Image: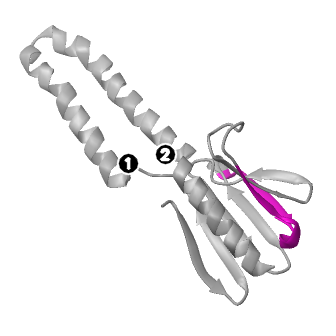
Amino acid sequence: MPYEWHPPAEETQRLHLWPHRSLGQRGFVWFIGLTAILIAVPLAAVIGSQVLWALLPFLGGALWAIWAALRKNGRDRDILEVLTLAPEQISLSRHGPHGRRQDWQANPHWVRVDLHPTGGPVPQYLTLRGANRDVELGAFLTEGERAALAGELRARLAALR
């Protein structure tokens, strides 16, 4: 699962959540390399002709577009959500793409974990309600992962109170 509970430090518990990463750095290099080879295979038939020089800019542009799209997708997935549970305060910090950061704090005795089966932007929409505000948690998780996380959060909050 793309979330992990860190070992508790005294009475504080910490949860880290991040999006799935199906294509790592090594996979990215392999994909771009294989794509370049597969794009170059048809060029063998036109080696030595003027057609080769006419096709090269378009094939290079296609390879660059694939590379740029995959890099942008990777940067947009640079998200880390850190949920800290302590007896006196619960806090959520979301480190988003391009250095954006959002913070939320509330008293854990008044925080409610809500799992909305329908009606949210995604099925099994998970929110925390506290300090007169709803905050979304783990929007990038699958439906099953959000449901499992909701159960874990409820149990940990109940033990904290």
The answer to whether 3 is drawn above or below residue 73 in the figure is below
* Residue 153 shown in magenta: no
- Residue at 45% x, 33% y is 69
Place residue 83 in its image quadrant: bottom right
The answer to whether 138 is drawn above or below residue 119 in the figure is below
- Residue at 64% x, 84% y is 8
Mark 1 element type: loop
Instruction: Give the quadrant of the C terminus.
Output: bottom right
- Left or right: residue 141 versus residue 130 is left
Q: Position of residue 12 (x, y in %)?
A: 72, 82
Q: Position of residue 126 (x, y in %)?
A: 68, 51
Q: Which residue is mark 2?
A: 74
Classify mark 1: residues with Cα within 10 Å, few (<14), some (14-19) or many (20+).
few
Colour scheme shown: one colour
Magenta residues, as a range? 99-115
Q: Amino acid at mark 1?
A: Leu
* Residue 113 shown in magenta: yes
- Proximity of marks 2 and 1: CB atoms separated by less than 8 Å: yes
- Left or right: residue 102 versus residue 56 is right
Q: Which residue is mark 1?
A: 23
